[in-house]
Amino acid sequence: MEIEVKLSITGLVYNKSIVGTYGLVLSEELGNRRFSVMIGEPEAQSIALKINNKKPPRPLTHDLIKNLLTVFDSELKKVLIYDMVNDVFFSELHILKDNNIIIVDARTSDAVALAVRSECPIYIKSEILDIVGVEVEETTEHVEKNEKDLSKNNNMTVKDFDDMSIAELERMLEIAVQEEKYELAVNIRDAIKNKVK
């Protein structure tokens, strides 16, 4: 029997090396492995709007699909990342209609955008997570201290960034963007890029 691992969305990180793309960071709910999926700007914006509870003036494509599912008395039950070929993830939507599950192939970015709107779980096959998952050690105390430092101060140094893990830097990047500290966000993003090299 194939094992599926439940995921949560950790964040979105701008990808400087390929213009107009973002890294969607996903992590296992009951563990410390993470991985990222490269997605386009429209899908990243769609996911970010829903996560931040912001409503666009008109329905986006993913809102439309969610509305169509509702109109046709269907429900998205789960999203499953089921394969990876040449670093491209393959996902499927598991839709409940008339007590039957219908499986529809989808891009991972679209599947996640629909999942956040439907409040349904996201899973990945364990053998794929074994390949792409990277273990991160995140000490809550260290992250909380750095978040406080960030709130007080825009002048964190390169040395401060060197002492932080990628997971901590990604969290700090999210906070910097939310607080509209864009110059600091650029420095954090560069520190992440240097650590990934």
Image (spheres, helix red, strand yellow):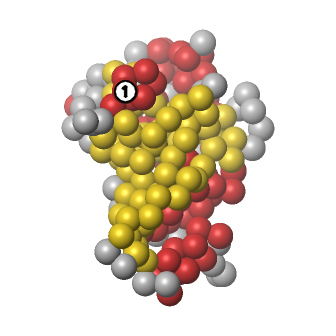
- Secondary structure beneath dot 1 equals helix
* Place of residue 27 in the rendered image (x, y in percent of width and height, measured from the top left): 37, 37
* Place of residue 158 in the rendered image (x, y in percent of width and height, measured from the top left): 54, 18
Is residue 132 at all visible to an observer of this figure? yes
**Which quadrant of the view contains residue 6?**
top left
User: At 55% across and 17% down in the image, what residue appears?
Assistant: 196
Q: Is residue 184 left or right of residue 127?
A: right
In the image, is residue 99 above or below residue 182? below
Residue at image mark 1: 127
In the image, is residue 114 above or below residue 2? below
Q: Is residue 80 left or right of residue 29?
A: right
Pick out the residue farthest to the bottom: 71
**Which quadrant of the view contains residue 147?**
top left
Q: Quadrant of the C terminus?
A: top right
* Place of residue 56 in the rendered image (x, y in percent of width and height, measured from the top left): 61, 75
User: At 51% across and 46% down in the image, what residue appears?
Assistant: 91
Seen from the viewer's position, the closer of residues 175 and 92 is: 92
* Place of residue 146 in the rendered image (x, y in percent of width and height, measured from the top left): 36, 33
Q: Residues within 10 Å of mark 1 (few under 14, many from 20)?
A: some
Q: Is residue 32 left or right of residue 18?
A: left
User: At 69% across and 50% down in the image, what residue appears?
Assistant: 41
Is residue 51 at all visible to an observer of this figure? no
Task: Please give the count of numbered marks on the rendered protein.
Answer: 1
At label 1, the amino acid type is Glu
User: At 36% across and 70% down in the image, what residue appears?
Assistant: 100
Q: Quadrant of the N terminus?
A: top left
